[in-house]
Image: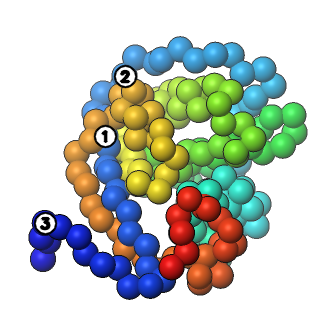
């Protein structure tokens, strides 16, 4: 039962507000700066170790851990599914970003993950990557493109998705064990979120 006011969390638990957003028609693409040396590389049937390393490097500041704790079989069932597309943002031979599009629900695409390494943020790569995501998603026969973000994500994430044409349609509160205390992420990950 929900009520107004504050609810204490037990030690070792985290909570965040999740916002779900969608678009039901292809938006006008927002021009972004040219990104010299950046390439979007489709990685078919990615090696699980590669995927987890990139996922962790990009997501650690925001406490991304969901794919790190999945069994190999469960993770492979997702990232090796022919209806899930995995892309790396490659700059000077190094993978610096991740784009994951999930077409497993007919007529829809979920923007499952879109992220960049800390070293690349602020160089226009986010807009460039979102433009590639929009192009790829809407090149398929879909009627809906959707994403969710949370209050622990990059502070500009929600506004970025809205500027990209997504519209919020639902909120949820997510509770979970702090992955740093569970040993799933380093204890110094996300230093803006205190350990309790």
Disc 2 crowd, CA 10 A, few/some/many (<14, 14-19, 20+): few
| Disc 3/disc 1 C-alpha distance (Å) | 27 Å
* Residue ID for mark 3: 4
Query: In the rendered image, is residue 41 in sight?
Result: no
173 with respect to 192 (left or right): left
Badge 1 element: strand
Tag 2 and tag 3, C-beta contact below 8 Å: no
Residue pictured at 23% horizontal, 51% vertical:
170
Q: Nearer the viewer, residue 145 or 128?
A: 128
Question: Depth-wise, is mark 3 or mark 1 nearer the camera?
Answer: 3
* Residue ID for mark 2: 27
Q: Nearer the viewer, residue 66 or 196?
A: 196
Q: Nearer the viewer, residue 30 or 175?
A: 175
Q: Picture coordinates of residue 109 (x, y %)?
A: 41, 44
Residue 22: mark in rendering: 1
Quarter holding residue 140: top left
Disc on the earlier residue, 2 or 1: 1
Q: Work out whether 122 lies above or below 150.
A: above
């Amino acid at each position: 039962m929900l009520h107004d006011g504050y609810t204490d969390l037990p030690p070792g638990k985290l909570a965040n507000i999740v916002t779900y957003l969608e678009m039901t028609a292809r938006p006008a693409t927002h021009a972004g700066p040219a990104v010299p040396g950046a390439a979007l590389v489709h990685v078919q049937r990615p090696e699980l170790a590669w995927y987890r390393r990139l996922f962790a490097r990009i997501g650690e500041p925001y406490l991304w851990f969901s794919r790190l704790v999945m069994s190999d079989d469960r993770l492979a069932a997702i990232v090796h599914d022919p209806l899930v597309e995995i892309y790396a943002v490659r700059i000077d031979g190094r993978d610096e970003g991740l784009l994951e599009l999930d077409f497993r629900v007919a007529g829809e695409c979920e923007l499952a993950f879109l992220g960049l390494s800390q070293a690349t943020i602020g160089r226009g790569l986010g807009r460039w990557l979102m433009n590639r995501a929009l192009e790829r998603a809407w090149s398929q026969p879909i009627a809906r493109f959707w994403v969710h973000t949370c209050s622990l994500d990059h502070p500009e994430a929600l506004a970025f998705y809205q500027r990209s044409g997504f519209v919020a349609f639902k909120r949820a509160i997510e509770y979970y064990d702090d992955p740093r205390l569970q040993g799933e992420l380093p204890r110094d990950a996300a230093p803006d979120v205190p350990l309790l």
